[in-house]
Image (cartoon, rainbow, N blue to C red):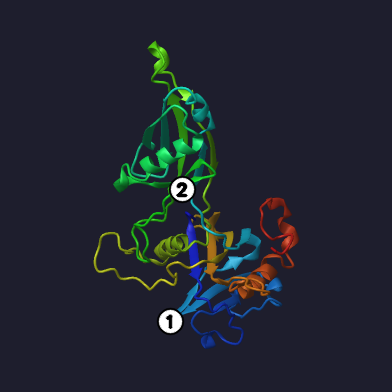
């Protein structure tokens, strides 16, 4: 999440640009002007020294701060990617080999890393006894039954079997499934390890721990265009407009309506810049600022190509960022579009 001055514009799926007059803009339209207030298009933006981006709403135009071309640090366009959860696969071939002649005790311990209220990582352990001759699929079945029933009220993963392997999938957060949520978006992040002991061994050998599984983890994807992250960005951005009461246990909640749609999927543009200003003691300083724009897209179907509602505003920003003065920024080393227009 952006942690400094941020303007967040969440489009409503209109995706068009107002090119005739600001007063003629309709709700959902984007407005782009230069520093003097002249409306820009993709053909005129390249010569602009600075721009300002706005989104027309029912209560007026929500504007970004003025963005000077000389002060741009980074410019990124990101298409929405499907959201996925953390998944861990355990292949119990090692445990099955150990259980060929005698019963073994198998333990799977999950370590959760996403709990901000815990000073240390939270763990859950699950234990089964695999009888002599149990296959890796049999052991996976035992864990599926154990994990899906034990500690059900505080469960954070679901278990299933695939190709005779145990597959653990993180559960989605559900305490933040509303627009006006005081719970920030989050994902269950966890890892797993597994070991076995041989209770029938003699002496201390019965306490020795041995590797029980081959473990593979696939990290989940939380795209920047996920509606909960867009919601949080839009809500946090209100603070820079002087709107501090966003529902932190107070009533009444007086704030503008949010544009984000529950369950929506968004493409995004992030433009980072450092505008210079003159301080009271006659020094020149820079302040980090960001403009984030989110809007929906039409998925590809049949022979149709994917169509983003950000296409029009992106064309203007491409022209502005990669315009006539682009060659002066090659020393910055950022992944922006000073040398080339972002594809």
Decide which of 97, 326 is in the foreground and name it: 97
Residue ID at (52%, 41%): 164
Q: Which residue is mark 1?
A: 58
Residue ID at (38%, 20%): 199
x, y percent for residue 148: 37, 45
Q: Is residue 78 found left or right of 197 in the rendered image?
A: right
Q: Is residue 169 found left or right of 153 in the rendered image?
A: right
Helix, strand or loop status at disc 1: loop
Residue ID at (74%, 67%): 324
Mark 1 and mark 2: Cα distance apart in space: 42 Å
Residue 329 placement: quadrant? bottom right
Residue ID at (42%, 21%): 198
Decide which of 196, 232 is in the foreground and name it: 196
Q: Is residue 340 found left or right of 58 in the rendered image?
A: right
Q: Is residue 26 visible?
A: yes
Q: Which mark is residue 183?
A: none
Binning the other alpha carbons within 10 Å of mark 2 as few (below 14), some (14 to 19) or many (20 upward) gives: many
Q: Which residue is mark 2?
A: 169
x, y percent for residue 123: 37, 36
- Please report contact status of discs 1 and 2: CB closer than 8 Å, yes or no: no
Q: Is residue 93 above or below residue 322?
A: above
Q: Is residue 204 found left or right of 41 in the rendered image?
A: left
Q: Nearer the viewer, mark 1 or mark 2?
A: 2
x, y percent for residue 325: 73, 64
Decide which of 301, 253 is in the foreground and name it: 301
Helix, strand or loop status at disc 2: strand
Q: Is residue 73 visible?
A: no
Decide which of 49, 45 is in the foreground and name it: 45
The disc, 1 or 2, on the residue closer to the chain's N-terminal end is 1
x, y percent for residue 322: 71, 65
């Amino acid at each position: 999440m952006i942690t400094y001055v941020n303007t967040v514009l969440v489009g409503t799926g209109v995706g068009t640009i107002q090119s005739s007059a600001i007063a003629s803009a309709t709700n959902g339209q984007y407005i782009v002007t230069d520093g003097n207030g002249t409306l820009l298009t993709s053909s005129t933006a390249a010569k602009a020294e600075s721009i300002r981006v706005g989104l027309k709403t029912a209560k007026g135009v929500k504007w970004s701060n003025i963005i000077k071309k000389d002060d741009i640090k980074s410019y990124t366009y990101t298409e929405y990617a499907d959201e996925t959860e953390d998944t861990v696969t355990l292949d119990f071939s090692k445990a099955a080999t150990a259980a060929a002649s005698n019963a073994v005790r198998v333990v799977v311990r999950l370590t959760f890393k996403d709990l901000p209220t815990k000073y240390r990582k939270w763990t859950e352990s699950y234990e089964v006894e695999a009888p002599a001759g149990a296959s890796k699929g049999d052991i996976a079945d035992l864990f599926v039954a154990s994990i899906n029933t034990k500690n059900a009220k505080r469960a954070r993963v679901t278990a299933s079997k695939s190709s005779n392997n145990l597959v653990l999938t993180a559960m989605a957060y559900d305490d933040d499934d509303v627009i006006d949520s005081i719970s920030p978006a989050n994902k269950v992040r966890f890892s797993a390890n597994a070991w076995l002991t041989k209770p029938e061994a003699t002496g201390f050998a019965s306490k020795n721990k041995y590797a029980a599984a081959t473990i593979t983890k696939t990290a989940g994807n939380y795209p920047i265009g996920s509606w909960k992250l867009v919601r949080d960005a839009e809500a946090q951005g209100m603070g820079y407009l002087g709107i501090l009461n966003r529902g932190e246990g107070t009533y009444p909640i007086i704030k503008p309506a949010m544009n984000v749609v529950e369950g929506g999927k968004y493409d995004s543009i992030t433009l980072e810049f450092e505008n210079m200003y003159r301080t009271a003691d006659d020094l020149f300083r820079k302040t980090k600022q960001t403009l984030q724009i989110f809007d929906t897209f039409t998925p590809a179907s049949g022979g149709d190509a994917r169509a983003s509602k950000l296409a029009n505003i992106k064309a203007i920003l491409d022209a502005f960022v990669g315009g006539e003065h682009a060659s002066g920024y090659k020393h910055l080393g950022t992944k922006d579009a000073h040398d080339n227009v972002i594809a």
